[in-house]
Amino acid sequence: MGSKDQVGSPWDLARPDEISTEISDIEPLVDHFFNRVNIKNPIVTRQDASQYCRQYCTHGSLSNLETCLVLLMCALGAVSMEFDPSNVTQSPSSSSHPSSRLASLRLGYRYFVAAEKCLGSALSSVHSLAIQCLCLAGIFHMYLIRPMHALRMFHAAGSSLQILASTNASSAEGRSQVYSSLFWTCYKSEREILAEIPVSTPALRQPGWPDSYPLSNQPASMTSDMWASHEEDSWYFFLSEIALRRITDQVADVVYKYIDARENPPHSSSPGIEELIPVVVEFERQAETFRENLPPSIQFPDVPQFASTEWQQYSRGRYYRVLELMHRPFLFAAIHEPDCSAVVRVLAEKGLFNALRYLQHSHTSHRHHGTWLQLRNVIKAASLLLAASRSKGLKMPHGWEAGIDKALATYEYWAWEFPSCKTYAGVILALANSPLATDEEVRQIGFA
């Protein structure tokens, strides 16, 4: 389950002196950034971006944070991808690396290397522009599946935000729309990585003020035609991600305490599996309430229907994941205790059902902020299904073998960029070909 970032990537050959200052080159990249990246983490305003882009195209690449922000927007605009709902069910041809894919990565990396020259100033400054640069650098690393690089950037941004919140500046800048959006982007991004690789404590604590949710970036003087509907929808998506993140944190705390107590019984103070039933029923209620209250533009269909937008796609993925996670203790109990109660078995099978739905939902080849997290979640879901398939008391969801095949196709596609995918695939193959696996199971999954 290696988590080390890759080194010597093919796009490292990109030359930073090949970046453009022409408006005809910069505008399309910045537009891609707003349409593909900023709509999910709205931490830059169009007004500021336009101003900085004009300065950059007029005066060239300067050693200041305004230039740094423009270069980072261009880098993200280059590597981000247009979302294609129909590709969710398609297995990409991954034996080769399409030239367009490599060209986009190299173009984005050129702009990022140029931006890195200014990031030192961002590390030593404590204001919104510096934190925006650090946050976008973290997002760029996540797009390139470099979680440890990203963690350093998010932690640095979070530390600056924490300082800003504790000073007099917090009374003005600290309650602004930009500050609140930066806070929550760093808060959830850092915690998502640390949940997988707990190497440190988060830089940001829970907000200390009641109205901490991000505000709309629509000033009172802004006319309606300047407030595009998709920007408003992106704000709803951002808010919904924060709400579901809080539910997920609560679920994870209960689940991991239970499993840790089961593995270390002398130190156990965790409730028994039967005592968890009402707790999980309440978590289910919270998750369903979350889904029912989503705005129309973010409401998603269940698989196998396509999610028509990235907002729907990633809201659905997080929803399936939290449902699987809250039922994991019951699956753990059902696998290790075949004589468990019928209720425990039913709840365990709910976990299997949602593990499969997560695999069916996942986009095999779409690059986004959460690609690394998706690759981690895929191996968890696949491992749970394979482990449960050895238990005679559990009913496997229909089509689970195809879900395992899709997981392997996903790892094959991304292994070129993220070699740990070879390890992930190896784990799945080892589980599938274990002595407990029947010849029929191996044949159905496609490993024979």
Image (cartoon, rainbow, N blue to C red):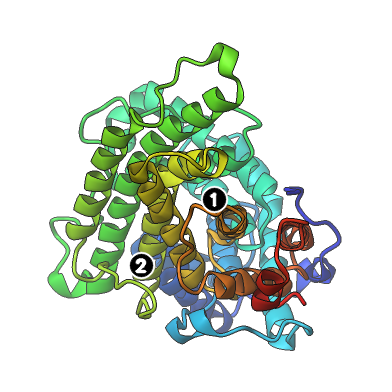
The relative height of residue 64 versus residue 426 in the rendered view (above or below) is above
Q: Which residue does the image show at 32% across and 71% down from the upper left?
A: 302
Q: Which residue does the image show at 66% across and 62% down from the upper left?
A: 144
* Residue to which mark 2 is pinned: 311
- Along the horizontal axis of the image, is 299 left or right of 133? left
* Residue to which mark 1 is pinned: 133
- Toward the top, the furthest residue is 266
Q: Which residue does the image show at 50% across and 74% down from the upper left?
A: 399
Q: Position of residue 148 (x, y in %)?
A: 68, 45
Q: Mark number for residue 22?
A: none
What type is the residue that disc 2 sits on?
Trp
Q: Which residue does the image show at 27% across and 49% down from the upper left?
A: 287
Q: Position of residue 316 (x, y in %)?
A: 37, 63
Q: Position of residue 436 (x, y in %)?
A: 72, 56
Nearest the camera: 351 or 91? 351
The relative height of residue 317 versus residue 77 in the rendered view (above or below) is above
Q: Quadrant of residue 271?
A: top left
**In the rendered picture of this protein, how many numbered marks are placed on residues?**
2
What type is the residue that disc 1 sits on?
Cys
Label 1 secondary element: helix
Badge 1 or badge 2: first in the primary sequence? 1
